[in-house]
Image (tube, rainbow, N blue to C red):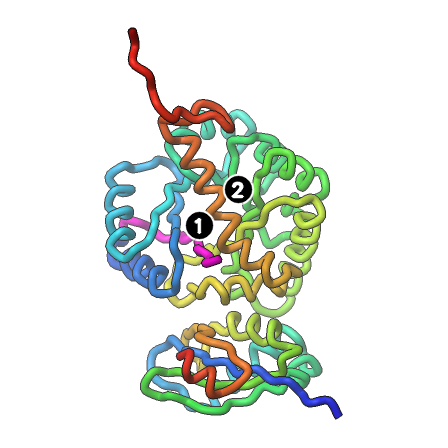
Amino acid sequence: MKRVKRRYLALQLECEGLPSEREFVDALWASVTKLYGEVGASSTGLSLINLDAERKVYVVKCLLAVLPEVRASVACVTSVAGAAASVNVLAVSGTLKALYSNI
Amino acid sequence: MKRYFADLHLRINPKETQITQQIIAKAARYGYSQISIPFTSQIDDAQISSLRAACVQVGLDFVVRADFKPRNQEDLMRFLRKFRRKAEIICIVCDDKEIARSAAKDHRVDLINFPSLDYHKRFFDRAEAELSFRNQTALEIDVKSLLVLEGPPRVRLLSSLRREVALAKEFHVPIVLSSGVSEERLMRMPRDLASIAYLLGLGESEALDAVSTNPTRIVATNREKLSQRFVAPGITIIREGKAD
């Protein structure tokens, strides 16, 4: 069976306060669902890996095939847990080791 | 090759000093090289100097831009005569077909912008695209509406924008992607701005060109034209001889 290729993204959240991991992931899912629908969102393989609470950097993974869709959805996030927010992609990498060395 | 990113449409009031400073600082932090805040009715030299100084402090290049929404063709001509030698970028905001055609036809216009969300008031069709290509007038797309709208209005806007982008690509009309934002929270990093262009049907390199190569090339060309050494396209004064 062919191995599924993934990409890891380091996302920096800009907002007041620190939303929980669940609230952040819900905001991402909401954005993906709004743009691509439930079927499209289900094929992204999006999940949270890690959170650096001090720097508000969240590491998420998704499938390589849908990386442009996920990046577009991340850029379209305007609120997290009801508060105005923006999410910036700091780095994208194929391995967590390379991602952490980039950020 | 390193890309230099530009956001030519930050819709802020330069008189609100604190917000302006914050947005300029954020643009620098986000990795932009050039930014522009449009002037609408008149170009204030003192304001330009202070904005330029604020930009230089954080390592940004400030571009003087004039935006205008003409009522008729005479109005457009009057504006172009008055501002073309003062502004580095001229953008015509079109909500009328006659104005859109005249703007695309005029080589003094750099950007055409269609702000309306109404499908019937967006006039970037095949004829407009052909005229824009002949005069190398670029199509400016603001992403702000895509960020703030939701549901059916966003679907309709996306549909219009995808059609316009497809036409621009077919007729080789340069596309300039700007934020068009007036609030700090809606600003996006250049590569994130480019990733939104993916929604409009632009490929990765085309989207990056829309936030880097296309706007910076227009600014460089116009700066060359506005310099005192410019004579005509392709002819510049290199050295002046002594009169005998």
Amino acid type shown at disc 1: Leu
- Is label 1 in a helix, a strand or a loop? loop
In the displayed structure, A17 sits above or below A90; it is below
In the displayed structure, B57 sits above or below B105; it is below
Residue B81 is situated, as x and y percent measured from the top left of the image, at 45, 25
**Quarter the N terminus of chain A occupies:** bottom right
Residue sitting at 44 percent across and 75 percent down? A90
Q: Nearer the viewer, residue A92 or B82?
A: A92
Residue A23 is situated, as x and y percent measured from the top left of the image, at 47, 88
Span colored in magenta: B1-15
Is residue B8 within the magenta segment? yes
Chain identifier of the residue bearing label 1 in the image: B
**Quarter the C terminus of chain A occupies:** bottom left
| Circle number at residue B111 | 2
Q: CA distance from mark 1 to mark 2?
A: 10 Å
Q: Which residue is mark 1?
A: B8
Residue B66 is situated, as x and y percent measured from the top left of the image, at 42, 39
Chief SS of the magenta region:
loop
| Mark 1 vs 2, N-terminal side | 1
Q: Residues within 10 Å of mark 1 (few under 14, many from 20)?
A: many
Chain identifier of the residue bearing label 2 in the image: B
In the displayed structure, B240 sits above or below A1; it is above
Q: Nearer the viewer, residue A52 or B118?
A: A52
Residue sitting at 37 percent across and 83 percent down? A56
Q: Nearer the viewer, residue B148 or B34?
A: B34
Is residue B36 within the magenta segment? no
**Mark 1 vs mark 2: same chain?**
yes
